[in-house]
Amino acid sequence: MSMNKIYLIGDMHTVSAFRLAGVAGVVSDKSGVADCLEDVIAKGDAGIVAITSELAREIQEKITAMALSGALPVIVEIPGIDDAEGFGMSALGYVSEALGIAL
């Protein structure tokens, strides 16, 4: 099975916005984000999982462990639509920065 899908785990507003762009999204809250991440990984087709900053803080140790292991999917932290700092760059920019390549 190819691992080429991009998923987003976040709040309702951010997930809805990304769905308009064709990105599969899962709405979660702080208490359910770890389970949501496990569910997305279990699908077996995730290459990149974007998680809003607010939710990523709840599972930072898990995200760090996954990044250090080098295993897919790549986890990318992005600001949510409702975050005070807002979007500093496009979603593609966040993915590009996380992978360390120009897309």
Image: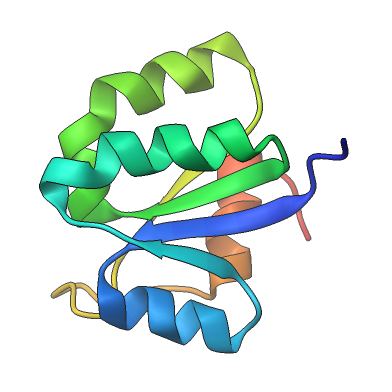
Q: Give the quadrant of the N terminus.
A: top right
Question: In the picture, residue 45 is in which quadrant?
Answer: top right
Q: Single out the residue that lies furthest toward the right.
A: 1
Location of residue 9 in the rendering, given as x and y in whole percent from the top left corner: 39, 56
Q: Residue at x 50, y 78 (%)?
A: 18
Q: Nearer the viewer, residue 86 or 2?
A: 2
Q: Is residue 47 visible?
A: yes
Q: Give the quadrant of the C terminus.
A: bottom right
Q: Residue at x 64, y 19 (%)?
A: 71
Q: Nearer the viewer, residue 77 or 11?
A: 11
Q: Is residue 87 visible?
A: no
Q: Is residue 10 left or right of residue 99?
A: left
Question: In the picture, residue 13 is in which quadrant?
Answer: bottom left
Q: Is residue 95 above or below residue 91?
A: above
Q: Nearer the viewer, residue 36 or 88?
A: 36
Q: Is residue 100 left or right of residue 39?
A: right
Location of residue 73 in the rendering, given as x and y in whole percent from the top left corner: 62, 34
Location of residue 98 in the rendering, given as x and y in whole percent from the top left corner: 56, 44
Q: Is residue 65 above or below residue 52?
A: above
